[in-house]
Image (spheres, rainbow, N blue to C red):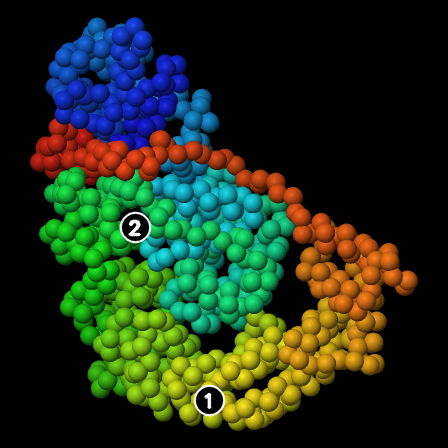
Amino acid sequence: MTDHDFEVVCRDLFSEILGVPLELFPRGRDRGIDLRHKAADGTTTVVQCKHWPKATQATLTSRLIKDELPKVVALKPDRYLLAASVGLTVDGKDGIRKAFAPFVRTTGDLYGVDEIVAELRSRPELVRRHFRLWLSSTAVLQTVLNQEKYVRSSWLHQRIPRAANTFVPHEGFDRAKAVLDEQRVCVISGLPGVGKTTLALMLAAWLMGNGYEVHEISQDAEEITALWREGTPQLFLYDDFLGQTTLESPLNKNEDARLIEIIRGIQEAPDKALVMTTRDYILEHALQRHERFGATDLSAATSVVHLTDLDIYVRGQILYNHVHHAQLPAEQKWPFADQPVWQPIVEHRNFSPRLIEETLRLAGRREHDVAGAVLQNLDDPRRIWERIVENDLSDAAVQLLEVLFTLRTAALDTLMDSWSRYRKELGLQADSRIFRRALQVLDGTMIAVDPYGVSFHNPSIADYLRFHINAGRASISALLGALVESGQIRSLIDAARLPDGSGIIEQLKAEAELTAAAVVKTAEFVETSTSPGEESEASHLQWVLETAELLDSAPLATYVAKELTLGPWHGEHVEHLISLMEAVAGSRLISDEYATRFADEVADGMRMELAELVEDGDWYFAVRTYVALREIGGALSGPPLEALVECALDGLHVIAKEDDAFLDAEPQVVLLQFLLDQGYEADSDFEQVEDLVTIQQRVGRFLNPHHVPRFAPRWESTSPHPKDDEERALKVITELMKGLRGPDGMPSGQENLSNPFGAANNE
């Protein structure tokens, strides 16, 4: 806990102990008051808070007598209490009481860390009201992180305590908690660096406190299925589930369909939860590209973290926490205590917790003026990585980053293979010794190497590499010659599609032949599939056409036109076929003749598919195919339509007899709508009228679910929120930031090692 956290907790705790409200005062140089109650009769009670966790009792006593006693004598309170994060013995309490008599009435007014903890244990509701106190309590973080059954990832073991050190609750956090409480699934969206992952980790800590196991999902949704254990409370944490920097094809094969199935399962399970994070613009694109996400109303489970959630009060606390816990020498922390230094940072339009964290992590070794470096990096967010990439790294290390950008995440041997090819394309030596040296330089700073492979340390580095490549600082032709996986060309195309990808577009156009060859080669890795989430020949061909449009590539357009004539298009999922048909119809590179012929072939293929589904008794996909056929202007009549109706009526009878607790709503809605369109009403004269009424009633219940809150505990803000009073907020943050110096404003690093205040603030 920081000094401020400790004082706020003490305010609430001693208000309960004393039975009176206490005023919270910022630290000051004049009167030495932290907490005070002034009664109507004029009597005054003062509680002094000393958060010196690394101090000894002897040092605490010495500093109290030297610094605080003169202030107490001048103040003359009627009662003086001490709350210290230092353990106090019987003899130690006697010494302090004697020195502070008559203001300290009894040793019972002297609370060391053991007495404070005992009081808190008897007040669990108070603990829950204070996020940081609750999180650090033995019932939650310390106990849980030491029990492997609760946290199934070394990454989470490391990140949750670190995130807790700097996290400040805000409105976005409250919204996310409410979404998770209601939906069991929460998608945290927001701008890069705004704190999505940290918020997800704190939600994980929240559920850990309720006995949930927390599992990190690092590859794809299939991991959730493998980890799922009936009867065990589990939270699955899926960070950047749509990818970090690209908009296209961010999901593995069948990922969207699996996610939909898993989301539905979690929402129905009494002891499962799912938290996912993504950037807002990537989520928006995914909702457009993956129709199934929209079909499940994923937006209901989405909570966006806005920059406006981080008001001045929250930003000030975030900055203080980051500096307070940073591994920096004391003299590099002191400047942050001055308002002209910290205020431009917390008010900056580009304020970003991640940018501050990374600057503090890297600047201590590179910058004399760390506070100035933070402000400069906010002015130009690229600066933090640009200086390192363009000035400090060897060519081999930069080239490793450039290759990793195309791979996103890669096994070590795959990365080395592509890097070696890249170096050879550039006419440079490429051996394992140079590769290992480059890897060693980057590991822990810009990349992370673990048993799963190699990836960027955080998404902002990949963002910078995109800028780096867009600016022409890498050789696109050499990168195209170094491809070892089909995903690499996709990464370059995806980056080119972004608003700031015009430079990459021009470079790919300049290497039109190499680019077209690489794009066409990706077809070798595509297989036909009937699954909507699985990449298919149709969806891949649509991607090639979109790439042709992006690059104005006649060779790629010719390739697409040729592939369109290779029908019949039968066996592909209808959603893929319809999407491809619409793309072809709207393309400026494909003639109307090809578009019309392809549309006719798609309609014929859908009729064939529908007939097979009816024959197999698969009423659900048969009806879905019929609806899709109607949407593209196709028709179905006569015996084929009659056979479809009979199939649907058979399905109606089957599901009407099943327990609705185990049935999804969507298939029943599809079936009901089809039969209504065919003229089957509840008062119709046909044998299945009872079944139809049953399904209608179920659908009505599905559309009006009853919400029951699922998780506890909840906590309140640790202090009255001053966001509506900016002047007050600035005053509070001013006093908070003074904690980066020693008592009475003295820089803590200038004192000797016996000074507990300085030591505490540099831990």
Q: Is residue 601 above or below residue 641?
A: below
Q: Position of residue 445 (x, y in %)?
A: 26, 60
Q: Secondary structure at mark 1?
A: loop
In the picture, measured across the screen, residue 451 lies left or right of residue 682, that is left
- Of mark 1 and mark 2, the one earlier in the sequence is 2
For the image, the number of numbered tags is: 2
Q: Position of residue 583 (x, y in %)?
A: 52, 81
Cα separation, mark 1 vs mark 2, equals 45 Å
Q: Position of residue 589 (x, y in %)?
A: 46, 89
Is residue 336 in view? yes
Q: Which residue is mark 1?
A: 589
In the picture, measured across the screen, residue 691 lies left or right of residue 219, that is right
Q: Is residue 127 above or below residue 549?
A: above
Is residue 88 in view? no
Give the residue at x 34% y 41%: 168
Q: From the image, which quarter does the C terminus lie in? A: top left
Q: Nearer the viewer, residue 553 or 613?
A: 553
Give the residue at x 18% y 21%: 32
Q: From the image, which quarter does the N terminus lie in? A: top left
Estimate how packed mark 2 is, as few (under 14), some (14 to 19) or many (20 or more) residues with alpha carbons within 10 Å: many
Give the residue at x 39% y 34%: 717
Q: Which residue is mark 2?
A: 353
Q: Position of residue 619 (x, y in %)?
A: 76, 70
Estimate how packed mark 1 is, as few (under 14), some (14 to 19) or many (20 or more) residues with alpha carbons within 10 Å: some
Give the residue at x 71% y 75%: 626
Three-letter amino acid code at disc 1? Leu
Evaluate if marks 1 and 2 touch, with contact meaning CB atoms under 8 Å apart: no
Q: Which mark is residue 160?
A: none
Q: Nearer the viewer, residue 585 or 438?
A: 585
Three-letter amino acid code at disc 2? Pro
Q: Nearer the viewer, residue 196 or 158?
A: 196
The image quarter containing residue 72 is top left
